[in-house]
Amino acid sequence: MQALPLRRHDLRHTGLTWMADAGIPVHILRKIAGHGSLTTTQRYLHPDARSITAAGKALSDHLSARRSPSGPRLKVV
C-alpha cells in the first residue's frame, strides 16, 4: 500500500488536535485556527483512543467522588 503525500493542511489537523489534547479549550482553538464557527474547528480534531479513554475515566472519577454532606459544591468556570 502506498502512503499518501503529506499536505500542509494535514498539519493544521495535527496541530489543532495536539493543542486540544494538551487541554486548550475548543473556543480558543477556533480563534487560533481563524474559524468562524466551533463546528468547523471540531472537524479538525481527531482524538485518539487514549484521549477518549481518559475522558471516560475523568467522568467516572468525577461521578464517584465523595460529595459534601451539605450538598453539591458549585465550581466557577
Image: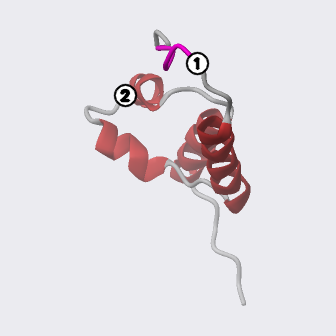
List the single residue furthest toward the front. Answer: 69
At 61% from the left and 25% from the top, the residue drawn is: 67
Asked which quadrant contains residue 18, the reply is: top right
Residue 72 point in image, percent of width and height: 49, 20
Q: Which mark is residue 46?
A: none
* Magenta-drawn stretch contains 9: no
Left/right placement of residue 65 relative to residue 37 reads right
Q: Which mark is residue 69?
A: 1
The residues bearing labels 2 and 1 have C-alpha atoms spaced at a distance of: 46 Å
Chain part drawn in magenta: 68-74
Q: Amino acid at mark 2?
A: Gly
Residue 34 point in image, percent of width and height: 37, 28
- Residue wearing tag 2: 34
Residue 71 point in image, percent of width and height: 49, 18
Asked which quadrant contains residue 65, the reply is: top right
Residue 42 point in image, percent of width and height: 41, 46
At 50% from the left and 13% from the top, the residue drawn is: 75
Q: Are marks 2 and 1 in contact (CB under 8 Å)?
A: no
Q: Nearer the viewer, mark 2 or mark 1?
A: 1
